[in-house]
Amino acid sequence: MDLANSPAEAGLSDAAVRHMVMAAAAMAAKALTDTEQPAEGRLGTLLDAYGRVQAARGPAAPLPFSRFRRLLQGDLARLLPASVPAEEMGPCPRGVDTFSCCYAASVRVADCCS
């Protein structure tokens, strides 16, 4: 079996890759901040989010888990593979850090970056 080296080779559009990464970042944000969920559940959600980012990046652009955790605290566009333009994944226009904005959207408190 020959695996695609990039999302584009797998037939995914740039928009689909951006959506996968943003959805995974929202999952991770919730996992890192939801103190009502047991630690095992939060870890499972975080690892699921990491796997989704890895899938969006493809095997040609691996991302160590430690770097994934660091990148969640900054510009989420850096989670994308280099071949996918960030476009609308830029900084929040309201000055809110992207992680907080992503979390707010994930729990439907706000949709601050739209």
Image: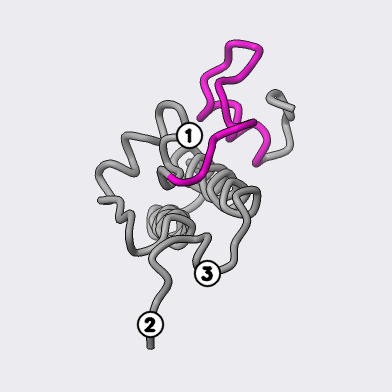
| SS for dot 1 | helix
Question: Mark 3 or mark 2: which comes first in sequence?
Answer: 2
Question: Mark 3 or mark 1: which comes first in sequence?
Answer: 3
C-alpha gap between disc 3 and disc 2: 11 Å
Residue 48 lies in quadrant: bottom left
Residue 49, numbered circle: none
Query: What is the three-letter code of the residue carrying label 2?
Result: Asp
Identify the residue under disc 3: 10
Question: Mark 1 or mark 2: which comes first in sequence?
Answer: 2
| SS for dot 2 | loop
Asked if residue 111 lies left or right of residue 80, the reply is right
- As displayed, is residue 76 above or below residue 10? above
| In front of the other: 19 or 61 | 61
Query: What are the residue bounds of the magenta stretch?
Result: 83-106
Circles 3, 2 touching at the beta carbon (< 8 Å): no
Residue 76, numbered circle: 1
Q: Residue sitting at 45 percent across and 62 percent down?
A: 55
Q: Residue sitting at 54 percent across and 35 percent down?
A: 86
Q: Position of residue 76 (x, y in %)?
A: 48, 34
**Crowding at label 1, few (<14), some or many (≥20) Cα neighbours within 10 Å?**
many
Asked if residue 111 lies left or right of residue 62, the reply is right
Q: Residue sitting at 30 percent across and 51 percent down?
A: 63
